[in-house]
Image (tube, helix red, strand yellow):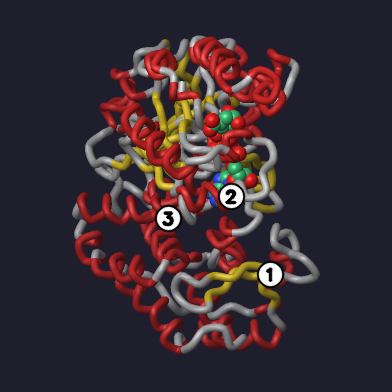
Amino acid sequence: MIVLVGFMGAGKTTVGRLLADRLGLPFVDTDLVIEDRERRTVPDIFAADGEQAFRDVEQAVVADVVAGPEAVVSLGGGACGRAATREVLRAHTVVHLDVSFEQAKARTAGDTYRPMLHRPGLAELHASRRVVFEDIADLSVRTDGRRAETIALEVLDRVTDQDGVLVAPPGGTYRVHVRAGSLADVGPQLPATGKVLVVGRAADPSLARILPGLRAQAHVVELPEGPVKTLDVYGRLALHAAEIALHPDDLVLAVGDEAVVDVAGFLAATYNRGVRWAVVPRSLEGLVDSSLGGKVALDLPQARNLLGAVHQPVAVFSDPQGVSADTDPRFGAGLAEAVKTALVADPSDLELLVAGAPAVLAGDVEAISALVRRAVVTKARIVTADEREAAGRLHLNYGHTFSHAFEQFDVENPLSLGLMAAAHLARRLGLLDDAGVGAHRDALRAFGLVTAHRFRLSELQPFWLRDKKFKDGVRFVLLHGPGRPEAGVPATDDALTGALEDLAEDR
Ligand SMILES: Nc1ncnc2c1ncn2[C@@H]1O[C@H](COP(=O)(O)OP(=O)(O)O)[C@@H](O)[C@H]1O
Ligand SMILES: O=C(O)C1=C[C@@H](OP(=O)(O)O)[C@@H](O)[C@H](O)C1
Ligand SMILES: [Mg+2]
């Protein structure tokens, strides 16, 4: 049970509701339970029977609520005055939302609902209650000048397991555990479950490291090399799931490259209208980008990712050990994703990325882990704020509109070229200066990635028709500078032709 305490106006009711949503738990506000039980409002109880009568009811209600089913519980500001209440709270996670007297007054100015606000000595009441809150709380969160959403996320981060990067979009809260050499620990860290349907590649040595640690009954489906994001492979997985009678609270464990994770995730999103799943990415693209955020999809012959869903996993286990240019045929694509994420994040992120490039290229696991962790933190932040691509998550498509079109041709690194093309286009449109384009080129070259290629606009245009960002013409994510992305930017054919010319000449 997570119990929010704090002075009137601290935001217990507001933050509690947000927190419950994120945790998928019921929300209980003890004031509302009191009103329900008494069939009168809080001010009516105060007016008719006085404060002590209210406190008696409140004490009984708090005791009942915390003894009930798991929930996020917001108490009234005066509830902790009773020693008996403080006693029953000892077994629970108590969070103090700390608010200054000035802010509390500002937030409740004009309030007619809270009788205690009109008592004399309110400042002293605030000071003395604060001592009690701090004493009984397991953690205390500052609220002055901060949005309720931000406060809820901090509480979430601090009350859940500390190990790993927190991802907390509305669709599910989970951690990304980035640690070199951690494959063998995956099994013991999975949530308790009856069955696990493990989906991986037949040739992947990671499976042998993970399977012995699984505590649940494991069913392993080994996929062949080659394309697997197909209706055919999906159909086979679904039949297998039906065969073993997989249930929503069982677990699909996706182990492997992006394609394996996508098809296994799509199964988890759709089978029985959703089964819990966890991800063990075994490619750099997966570690850096696709393992978190819950996007899953199948390809159709017409285009990639046409059938998809957003289904958040319950955990991601990212072990950079064993993922290298030798084992991962798409290592360069993963590096380009890391550059993309840093370009979208901020200039210092990009600097750190470039500084680490020689060690990453030399296969240094710690350097690769650091690169992965930075990308995960950025993506976790973005996805937490925008699960459904209404705003910030769109920025993670940076370079992708170009790269998806470039992929049709046999080019070395479509995303590296896509990022360069986006930089050239932004310069042609007057958004980005020469230094900004240079920052793209330098970062990509630091990782030995290609920065020049000749494409014709007429070859790309038909492909963009099916792009999800197409809206009266193709739309791009472009940068005004590192860390300053903008989505939905249209471009004239002239600007596009010019940008492709710049890309061909690498200028
Ligand atoms: N972090 C915040 N910043 C600004 N206003 C807030 C914040 N949290 C809550 N509020 C506002 O303050 C008032 C009191 O919030 P409420 O959640 O009812 O507090 P409590 O339950 O702790 O008394 C409401 O009008 C609410 O919208
Ligand atoms: O501080 C108090 O003594 C009270 C706070 C109120 O709840 P909030 O803290 O949610 O405003 C409510 O329980 C009642 O008006 C008494
Ligand atoms: Mg309240």
Q: Is residue 49 left or right of residue 294?
A: right
Q: Residue at x 31, y 42 (%)?
A: 178
**In-front residue for pair 427/231:** 427
**Quarter of the image containing the C terminus?**
bottom left
Query: Hey, what amino acid is under mark 2?
Result: Arg
Q: Residues within 10 Å of mark 2 (few under 14, many from 20)?
A: some
Write the residue at 34% across / 17% down.
214
Q: Which residue is painted at 57% across and 73% down in the image? A: 478
Which one is in front, 362 or 344? 344
Q: Earlier in the sequence, mark 1 or mark 3?
A: 3
User: Which is in the foreground here, disc 2 or disc 1?
Assistant: 2
According to the picture, the residue beneath numbered tag 2 turns out to be 107
Residues 361 and 190: in front is: 190
Mark 1 Cα within 10 Å, few/some/many (few <14, many 20+)? some
Q: Nearer the viewer, residue 117 or 1?
A: 117
Please tell me whether mark 1 or mark 3 is closer to you in this view: 3
Crowd band around label 3 with a 10 angstrom C-alpha radius: few (<14), some (14–19), many (20+): many
Q: What's the distance in space between the residues labelled 1 and 3, CA to CA?
A: 23 Å
CB at disc 2 and ligand 1 closer than 8 Å: yes
Above or below residue 265? Residue 145 is below
Q: Secondary structure at mark 1?
A: strand
Specify the amino acid type for callout 1. Arg
Residue carrying label 1: 475
* Secondary structure found at label 3: helix
Q: Which residue is mark 3?
A: 378
- Image coords of residue 336 (percent x, y): 42, 63
Task: Evaluate whether residue 171 shows in this view.
Answer: no
Side of 20 where 41 appears, left or right: right
Res 305 seen here? yes
- The location of residue 182, given as percent across then percent down, is 26, 34
Q: Earlier in the sequence, mark 2 or mark 3?
A: 2
Dot 2 falls on a residue whose secondary structure is helix
